Image (cartoon, grey):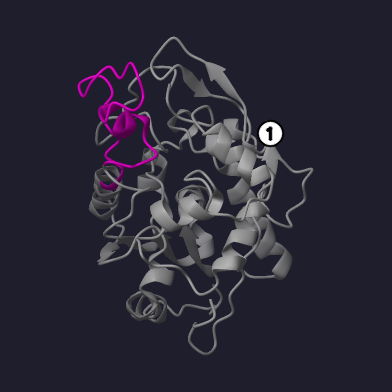
Amino acid sequence: MLDLPAGYRAIAPDQRGYGDADPVKKIDAKRGLGDLADDAVALLDHLGIERAHIVGHSLGGAVVWQLLINYPARFLTATLITPSSPYGFSGTKDMVGTPCFTDFAGSGSGLMNSESVERLANGDRSLDSPFSPRSISHTLVFKPPFIPKRDEELLSATLATHLGDQDYPGDSIQSGNWPYVSPGQWGPLNALSPKYAPDMRRLYAANPKTDILWIHGSHDLIISNNSAFDPATVGAQGLLPGWPGMEIYPPQPMLDQTRTVLEKYTEVGGAYREVVLQDAGHFPYLEQPRAFNEIFHRHIREHLGASHRI
């Protein structure tokens, strides 16, 4: 945001469940990312902005999928930065998002590491454990040895996550299917479950169709065809007992799913561009800012439209 070209205004709200957002407002996961999409458009309405460039990173990228379905006329361009698959996070096994089990076991909040949540709740700023927020950031989020200049500010933002059964990590339901938990009804992790993912036929039918830029890092361990946070990846390594094997529960092909959806999007009149930033993890705009800005700035300048807001 700090490096936007002249004439552009950046608006970056704290989404429901994070930072200074109203703690009373919860994410109803049964609506998928619908609450967060509605919040974003309500903000545009409040600010009197008819159309804008929309940018979403990770969870925010999943919100952009929903926005392009529900509010396609509101956006000049869309930029997806390492977004969750359009079929949600974890628990699906092919290019069309077929669930590994009908109850979507292995997705949602149930597999969140309890020590990680406890350290988050305690405001842990240490590197004492691989499950501390800072350790996760330095080893799994960013590509080592990269450490951002604003590391303390980013950590503070992480520690401002709203916690609880209706926030992060959210509630869960026991399952008879491996890994024995299925998604609950509240919070961002459950909202990301493929159980609540939007029907991509609605994206293909959207009118008008927004041009999409998809950027992801070459070394992203979170959004990957073998995500470090996918129970199938962990199970295949022998670290999560009972894994039923590749035929029943393979790692979710997150990147391939996204690419397949975007290729279908072009077949029905949309347009997209995929860019892989080398030597970058889950935060390519911090890890490779010069390369990212060159690509991103060109994208929004090519679609000036009636508004220069982002």
Horizontally, residue 110 falls left or right of residue 282, namely right
Q: Residue 197: where, in percent of width, then height?
A: 46, 36
Q: Residue furthest left?
A: 247
Boundaries of the magenta span: 226-255
**Residue at the spot 68% in from the left edge and 40% down from the top edge:** 163
**Residue at the spot 40% in from the left edge and 13% down from the top edge:** 177
Q: Residue 279: where, in percent of width, then height?
A: 27, 66
In the rendered view, tell whether residue 134 sits above or below residue 204: below
**Residue at the spot 53% in from the left edge and 80% down from the top edge:** 308
Q: Looking at this view, is 22 or 37 the one in front?
A: 22
- At label 1, the amino acid type is Gln
Q: Looking at this view, is 255 or 152 the one in front?
A: 152
Question: In which quadrant of the rendered view does residue 187 lie?
Answer: top right
If the image is split into quadrants, where does the C terminus sit? bottom right
**Residue at the spot 50% in from the left edge and 64% down from the top edge:** 54
Q: Residue 290: where, in percent of width, then height?
A: 36, 81
| Residue on which disc 1 sits | 166
Question: In which quadrant of the rendered view does residue 98 lie?
Answer: top left
User: Does the stretch in magenta take in 239?
Assistant: yes
Horizontally, residue 69 falls left or right of residue 226, namely right
- Crowd around label 1: few <14 · some 14–19 · many ≥20 (10 Å): many
Q: Residue furthest front?
A: 128
Numbered disc total: 1
In the rendered view, tell whether residue 152 sits above or below residue 262: below
Q: Residue furthest bottom?
A: 6
In the rendered view, tell whether residue 248 sits above or below residue 89: above
